[in-house]
Amino acid sequence: MEQTISPWLLTAIALLGGAAIGFALARLLPNAAPSRTQRQLDEMQQRFDSYQSEVVTHFNTTASLVKKLTQSYQEVQEHLAEGANRLALDELTRQRLLAALQAEDGGEKRERLTPPKSNEAPKDYAPKAPDAPGTLDEAFGLKR
């Protein structure tokens, strides 16, 4: 029985010794894998930061251009209105030109939709008189 304990004891000691040596080597040797991972993480963070910066710049430029476009459109509308006031031959022509400019600008009033008179849900069938045949009746729609 003593012979069977010896190989098990040697195996356990070798395993513990290997674990201790592996732990010591892991602590003492420079950590290559974590620094590589850290470099990759830093690189990804830098790329993400530059992407965010590009997005912010893009939208700021777009907002500025849209603002300029709106101002230019308003200036054109004002120029046309002044031209209509100054160049129209008579009052009727002037009023028609100004009305046309306001209509293009969206200045005309739109008709409002009126809400339904009842809150009852719409029916998915045709209403009928109490004594009339329904739409699924065989004689519906036939003349007698």
Image (cartoon, rainbow, N blue to C red):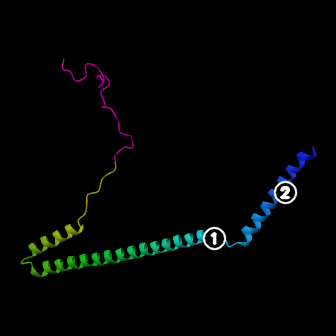
Bounds of the magenta segment: 116-144
Secondary element type, mark 2:
helix
- Name the dominant secondary structure of the magenta segment: loop
Which class describes the residues within 10 Å of circle 1: few (<14), some (14-19), or many (20+)?
few
Secondary element type, mark 1:
helix
Magenta span contains residue 48: no
Magenta span contains residue 127: yes
Q: Residue at x 16, y 73 (%)?
A: 98
* Foreground pick, 21 / 31: 21
Is residue 27 rendered to the left or right of residue 73?
Answer: right
The disc at residue 97 is none
Which quarter of the rendering shows the C terminus? top left
* Foreground pick, 111 / 69: 69
Is residue 31 rendered to the left or right of residue 144?
Answer: right
Image quadrant where residue 68 sits: bottom left
Q: Position of residue 125 (x, y in %)?
A: 32, 32
* Foreground pick, 23 / 76: 23
Which class describes the residues within 10 Å of circle 2: few (<14), some (14-19), or many (20+)?
few
Q: Residue at x 49, y 71 (%)?
A: 48
Q: Residue at x 31, y 52 (%)?
A: 114
Image quadrant where residue 12 sits: bottom right
Which quarter of the rendering shows the N terminus? top right
Question: Which residue is situated farthest in the top direction here?
Answer: 144
Report the residue marked by disc 2: 13
Report the residue marked by disc 1: 32
Q: Position of residue 51 (x, y in %)?
A: 45, 72
Look at label 2 and name its amino acid: Ile
Image quadrant where residue 71 sits: bottom left
Task: Tell me how far mark 1 sits from mark 2, CA to CA.
Answer: 29 Å
Q: Position of residue 8 (x, y in %)?
A: 85, 49
Look at label 1 and name its amino acid: Ala
